[in-house]
Amino acid sequence: MKYLLMAYVNEADWPRMTKADQEQGIAAYGAFMEAMKKAGVITGSNRLQPSSAATTVRLTNGKSQVLDGPYADSKEQLGGYFLIDVADLDAAISWAARCPATGHGAVEVRPVWDMGAAA
Amino acid sequence: MNSRESDEQAHGAAEAVARRSYGKLVAFLAARTRDVASAEDALSEAFASALTDWPRNGCPSNPEAWLMTVARRKIIDVFRGERRNEIASEELQVMAKRLETAASAAERMDHIPDQRLALMFACAHPAIDAGIRAPLILQVIVGLDAKAIASAFLMSPAAMGKRLVRAKEKIRQAGIPFSVPEREELSVRLDAVLEAIYAAFAEGWTDPGGTDAARRDLTEEAIFLAKLVTELLPQEPEALGLLALVLHAEARRRARRTGQGEFVPLAEQDPRLWDLQMIDEAEALLRRASALGSIGRYQLEGALQSAHVYRCRTGRSNWTEVVQLYDALFALSCSPVVAINRALAVAETHGAGAGLTAMPDAAGDTRLAEYQPYWAARAELLAKTGAHEEAGYAYERAIGLERDPAVRRFLQGRQAALEALKR
């Protein structure tokens, strides 16, 4: 089954970190990615630009409305995602638990809707 | 006394009884009906009744007996009412009768017999899936809720809840007995109980900083359960061995982290931070166990802890003895985890190269290939042989598999030190 691991972290923390801590943080994510590659579970992943770079679009009264900023304002923001393919939720949780984001934020685990299967 | 005060007092009393007697009450009720779920339901209703009754009428002189009386009435009501039409109704009548007789006898004598051990044996029965035994014991004996257990065992709360319900159904439907097995069967069956307790401890142990309350509680509960087993079965050397093992590990908790929360490996720990009283208690347990003349896995693991503590406190090398203990342990368990630790000890006596040769092979074994300590041990040994490139790669694997940020930082520090050497 495919699961999307969404890493939510407080963006404000990043610029406050020392350069050495930032490097260590990036290395930890790199090692996490490597581990998932070696286990053959990762199918896609990206780090996202900060939510200040986000633009939100919705249709209101038949008119497109374009708003500056993320969809939801929250203490922690979606900072990246990992799409993995594993046997079940428990396996997905065990990978989420290894994601460095759990140490300074949270990781949401969401099963992907399998469009091939009957709905 | 105003009503808020009496409310608080009732809450306090109910909580105290819950902590002390929950498992005992579940065990007493379930042993007569084989129905763990209905015992838990009835008991939680009884606690709810207590919270409305006690503030009004004052705390009863024997709160435990009060709760049991209310709970067993609720069970009997359910048996005689809702399930009247079930095919097994005759059997239910018999059970209801049995429960009533036993409960009124207990009330007359003002003593509820302790059947927690029987309940633990039911939970760790071979017919129950091995993976759910520890969670089941934590729920029915300690009274932890499914959510807390799920979190500690890294499972979704919904899945954990379902598995717990299924396991209790199995106990009821399969007619799993609530009894302490006979002598000849006891040691095999006791193994399953001890294994479940150790699994609970190990899950709690992964959070030595104690930042996750659910995890920290788990080690305390596991120690409580291990103690309980030794009190109820004082002549079982392996039960004593398990208690010694968990006390030894617990005694070093404070030393495993710096004030800033950084991970400290055993060799670099400050023995002054260890809980010496707990260590003495563990040592006494090991002596008691060995006097009983039957060695086993937990006694060996306890002895290993003891050997590590001795070496760190005296500075006298005892790696030869440590390797011998690992040899004995490996002969019993054939576990690759034991083989990894043995390899590290071999490296201390015969050099890192010999240690590497002694390491188990992860090729073709995905569980080992995804086991952080395997890569950390490999990295450590490779670094010592001067194979810096390979060591760096092994550290990378270990870092990617670790879930504790403090251990991750520790491994990153080792990897960085290696990089500095290469330059």
Image: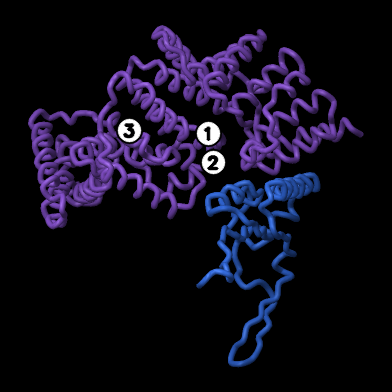
Whole-number angstrom distance, CA of label 2 to CA of label 1: 11 Å
Q: Position of residue B349 (x, y in %)?
A: 72, 12
Q: Nearer the viewer, mark 3 or mark 2?
A: 3
The tally of labels here is 3
Q: Position of residue B34 (x, y in %)?
A: 23, 41
User: Which one of the lettered chains is coloured blue?
Assistant: A
Q: Amino acid at mark 2?
A: Thr
Label 3 SS: helix
Neighbor class of circle 1 (other Cα within 10 Å; few <14, some 14-19, many 20+) is many
Q: Residue B205: which disc?
A: 1
Which residue sits at x=62%, y=33%?
Answer: B259
The chain carrying label 1 is B
Mark found first going from the N terminus, 3 or 2: 3
Give the drawing colour for chain B.
purple
Whole-number angstrom distance, CA of label 3 to CA of label 2: 29 Å
Q: Residue B211: which disc?
A: 2
The answer to whether B94 is drawn above or below residue B193 in the figure is below
Residue B205 appears in the picture as rendered = yes
The answer to whether B181 is drawn above or below residue A52 in the figure is above
Single out the residue that lies furthest toward the right.
B423
Residue at mark 3: B120
